[in-house]
Amino acid sequence: MTETATKFYTVKKGDNLTKIAAMYDLTLDQILEWNPDITDPDVIRIGQKVRVSAPDSSDEYQPFPGADFFVKGRRSPIIEAMGNRLVEVDCSAYPDDTPDSRWSDADQASYSKWQGRLGFEGKDADGIPGKKSWDKLHVPAVLAE
């Protein structure tokens, strides 16, 4: 990554996407384009990371979206990119080695294999990504189209 790496804002109590966009002199459409995992612009969570600068083409790997991003049923291209990486590093628990964009038990089991490979044990190998293990996985950057 370069010094012009993509910037993220951490959602605080009372925030909404329109307010965040205004703080960075952006439009709501830009925020939504740069954050494809936000499917409802009226629903954001405290602690959620929101991309507030244009994706830099030099950003090779997807930044860690935070552990609270990985909840059952969430759909995101980030999850599919992570799953494909887990298949590449032989840590797949996916049927037919075909991950999709929805966080599932197979994603969690696959990520747990990855954590185990890194030497994590117990609750540190529960299959929920953490920053250390995520950074070592090298998930390719996912950009909105």
Image: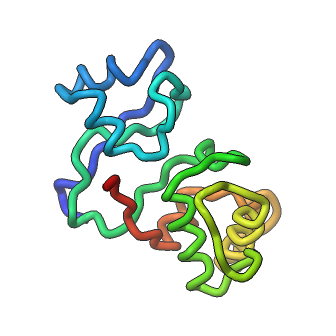
The N terminus - image quarter: bottom left
Name the residue nearer the viewer: 119 or 14.
14
Q: Quadrant of residue 115?
A: bottom right
Which percent across, then down, holds residue 40? 50, 30
**Residue at image coords 41%, 70%:** 140
Quadrant showing the C terminus: bottom left
- In the rendered structure, the answer to whether residue 117 lies left or right of residue 56 reads right
Question: In the picture shown, does residue 75 fall above or below 133?
Answer: above
Image point (79%, 57%), residue name: 123
Please give the name of the residue rendered at 50% of the width and 37% of the height, measured from the top-left corner.
39
Give the color scheme: rainbow, by chain, secondary structure or one colour: rainbow
Relative to 9, say whether 58 is above or below: below
In the depicted structure, whether residue 57 falls above or below residue 90? above
Which residue is the extreme one toward the right? 122
Q: Position of residue 90 (x, y in %)?
A: 65, 86
State the image coordinates of residue 93 (x, y, percent, origin top left): 76, 76
Q: What's the residue at 64%, 55% (across, down)?
A: 102
